[in-house]
Structure formats: C-alpha cells, structure tokens
Amino acid sequence: MFVSDLPPGEKWRNFELKALGLRDFARVRSDLPLNPFDLARFANLIVCDFNQIEGLSDTALEHLLGPASEKWSGGACSLPNGMKLVILNPKHSRTRTNATLMEEICHVFLGHEPNRLSIVTKDDKGKVMARDYRKVDEEEAYSVGAASLVPYAALKRFVLAGKSASEIAAHFRVSRELVEYRLKVTRLWQFYKRSR
C-alpha cells in the first residue's frame, strides 16, 4: 500500500486503514463491491426481515412504514446467545440498507459497546432525545463502514477516470449520497467538481 492510497488527515487515514482491514478479512479487493450481507454472519449478526416481526400493532406498523419511515434506517439488539439481531427498514433501497448494515457490522468489529435506550430528555439545544449514544462511536462506525463500501484508492481512480458519482455508486452498490460523502470527507470533492 502507498501513502497515496490513503486519504489526507490522520482521522480519515485511521478510518480507511480499519476499513481496508475489514475488506481484507472479507477477501474483497478494494476495487470490487463489498456485500455487507455476506459479512454480517462473521460479525455474529442475524439480519431479520421486517416482515418476520410479530406482535407489532397495526398502528405501529403503519407508523414505522409510513410517516416515520425516513426517521429510522435500522436497529440492533443483543440476544442472550451473544449474537445481535438487526432489523433494516424495508422502505429503504438496497443501497441504503447496505450502508446501514455495514455501520452495524463496524460497531461489532470495532468493539463498540451497544447503545442503550434512555429516558426521553432534551439536549443542550432543547431537542428531544430518545436514546443515549456515543457520538464518537457513531462517527467511527459510519465512517469506517462507508470507507469499507467505497475505498479511497478505488474512489480516487474512478474520479481520475471521469466517472460520475452515480456511476461510482452503481459500481459499489451504494447510494450516490454515500459516494458524495466519501468524496467530501476524503477531500476529493473539489477535484471531482472541477472534472465534471
């Protein structure tokens, strides 16, 4: 690996190295798409189809799949046997659920302690919060997951080849928004915009 295969900035380099470790573990080259559903079992994750959930009222189902469908992407809980159950939002595209599942996988591989539900409180800006989470863990899991799905070296090569964000997204089976996020945090955005 060359230094030019890593993004600028120590934090982003660290995220990239962890992501490359995950890809290496999965035995997937950096220029090929990574399927998080294949990787989930190695993280002791059981991905449950939303339709398999029993006991939710019709009102709750209608709410989760209707007005609240853009307010949640997925959730995970620990099972007594040490595995984790992950439920993904069925209203979201496969490209979006790939990112959600990859984030959950990263929480496991990075050794993050599970978040816990908390009493509803207001944050310092007066916003109502219904869960307790560690912002550093969330940023690391999302960033490493995104880097696992769209590695910097391959992203840079695609940009140099004049590929659009949509073409790169289709190649890696992720959303255009995730590719644009990666372009921005890896400081390739300005170069990408100039080449368009």
Image (cartoon, rainbow, N blue to C red):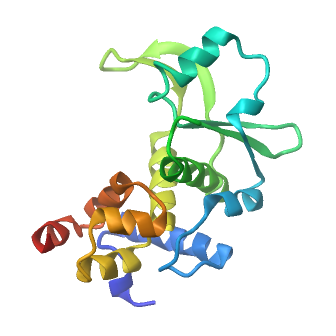
Query: Given the current orientation, which residue lies at the most extreme left position?
Result: 194
Residue depicted at x 72% and y 16% = 56
Q: Is residue 89 above or below residue 103?
A: above
| Camera-side residue of 73 and 176 | 176
Residue depicted at x 61% and y 51% = 107
Give how far across and how far down residue 189 sits, in percent: 21, 65
Q: In this view, does 26 lie above or below 177?
A: below
Query: Given the current orientation, which residue lies at the most extreme right position?
Result: 81
Give how far across and how far down residue 175 sits, in percent: 41, 54
| Camera-side residue of 58 and 181 | 58
Relative horizontal placement of residue 57, taking residue 137 as reference (left or right): right
Query: Given the current orientation, which residue lies at the most extreme bottom position?
Result: 2
Residue depicted at x 52% and y 13% = 120
* Quarter occupied by residue 26: bottom right
Instruction: State the quadrant of the C terminus.
Output: bottom left
Q: In this view, does 164 lie above or below 119?
A: below
* Quarter occupied by residue 106: bottom right
| Tally of marks | 0
Residue depicted at x 81% and y 46% = 83
Give how far across and how far down residue 1 sits, in percent: 46, 90
| Camera-side residue of 165 and 189 | 165
Relative horizontal placement of residue 56, taking residue 81 as reference (left or right): left
Q: Is residue 125 visible?
A: yes
Relative horizontal placement of residue 39, taking residue 187 as reference (left or right): right
Give how far across and how far down residue 54 sits, in percent: 79, 22
Q: Is residue 15 visible?
A: no
| Camera-side residue of 84 and 132 | 84
